[in-house]
Image: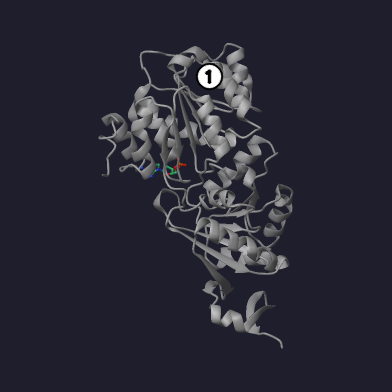
Amino acid sequence: MEKDFSSLGISEELISALKKQGVTKPTDVQQSAIGVILEKKDAIVRAETGSGKTLTYLLPIFMNIDLSLRSAQCIVLTPTHELAVQVYKQAELLAENSGMDIRSALIIGNAGMARQIEKLKEKPQIIIGSAGRIIDLIEKKKIPAHTVKTIVVDEADRMLDHMNVDMVKSVVKTTLKNSRQTVFLSASMNAEAVAAAKEIAVNEPVFCMAEEKLPELITHYYIECELRDKINLIRKIVRGEKAPKTIVFINNPENIEVTVKKLNYHSLKAVGLYGGTRRDERRKAINDMIHGKAEILVASDLVSRGLDIPGVTHIINMDIPENSTSYLHRAGRTGRGGKSGKVISLATKGEIRYINRLKRELKLNFKNVYMREGALVPVNADFKRKKTYTHKNNDTVYTKKQK
Ligand code: AMP
């Protein structure tokens, strides 16, 4: 049975705050997990990307915060600064719109520690950020860990991989075992991540599993093309489809810069999201996309997770992702919040086998198309069998196969 926010146990003040941001009906994952988190149970929540994961935990956390206590009560750990900023903004919005006196602090590495320490003097109840910096400030006694009751691990499959799991464990260990709740959320939880989550949680975690699938309003296409034509195809797709916001994904982060330059050369307003670059540069690239100063963001998988840029209409896989999890994460950057979106993969002959694997593993219906006069046109299977493609005036042209 469908539940509304009220029957899930969410208060009137939070429901009216949600209305102000256009949220009126809980999504599937919110229906299945809010009650469990509200009851302070340990939980593993698998939620499709863009399905309202952040509010799934922020709402019960807001409900469970003891307003009479001005000290840290919840820690949210995220793998990227961008995701931390998004969660922080959502928490601030919820506090402002509900009038609840709940403060949050953004505690991330590579940012001024002195300012963060100043912010902590306001005694925020929610600490959001990266495990390393949070540990640092707990050790410096700037964050009181003994009053923390809930630890949320967002993008848990990444946070619990061999690179990060020890850091997460260190944060959890600083809190009191008897009174803590741990909540793990991710679009994809592999066996290793589930095992680590179970080890960290004090009690057997409740599984709240939404199916690992993408929003139905996303359509999946692929275009067979030559490697050298990919940039020009991107130009044709963006112009032909009049796409206001596109994310172009490539496999090797080292190619981001050259791709941005090539797209700029084609008079496209492209920016790059470089994993290793300075945080303010990354923030600027994201803001340029959000505010429409840029129409294309070039990124790699390193930074695709959790990225919430409203209104992304097109995802273009300039390289085919190496596995289905990364396809899901990339595709999930569009079709968010009930909007439609297109994912277009540009595959060379050699990459077609990866498309076939994705079809099999994800059970997705990929439409084989080509660009003709600025439109995505289906390649008729019959037509394709008889003919082969060549290139003329930058258009892919299907001609009869040479005998
Ligand atoms: P998330 O999965 O947390 O990144 O959320 C994706 C987007 O969906 C965000 O822009 C949220 O504001 C929005 N959203 C979250 N919950 C709901 C809901 N119940 N109804 C409509 N939109 C929502």
Crowd band around label 1 with a 10 angstrom C-alpha radius: few (<14), some (14–19), many (20+): some
In the image shown, does 255 or 94 lie closer to the viewer? 255
Give the side of residue 201 with respect to residue 398, left or right.
left
Q: Is residue 401 above or below residue 284?
A: below
Identify the secondary structure beneath mark 1.
helix
- What residue is drawn where x is 71% and y is 88%? 403
Q: Is residue 78 above or below residue 104?
A: below
Q: Position of residue 262 (x, y in %)?
A: 71, 59
Work out whether residue 361 can be spotted.
yes
Give the side of residue 132 with respect to residue 207, left or right.
right
Which quadrant holds residue 174?
top right
Q: Is residue 150 above or below residue 264?
A: above
Q: Position of residue 397 (x, y in %)?
A: 63, 79
- What residue is drawn where x is 53% and y is 51%? 328
In the image shown, does 139 or 21 lie closer to the viewer? 139
Q: Position of residue 295 (x, y in %)?
A: 57, 55
- What residue is drawn where x is 54% and y is 60%? 360
Work out whether residue 96 can be spotted.
no
Q: Position of residue 401 (x, y in %)?
A: 67, 85
Total marks placed: 1
Q: Is residue 262 above or below residue 370?
A: above
**Where's the N terminus, which quadrant?**
top left
Q: Tell me the amino acid under the disc marked 1.
A: Lys
Which quadrant holds residue 239?
bottom right
Confirm or reject: label 1 Cβ below 8 Å from ligand 1.
no
In the image shown, does 403 or 62 lie closer to the viewer? 403
Give the side of residue 135 with respect to residue 90, left or right.
right
Residue beneath disc 1: 119
Color theme of the render = one colour
- What residue is drawn where x is 61% and y is 58%? 317
> Taking the image as four quarters, which one is ligand 1 found in?
top left
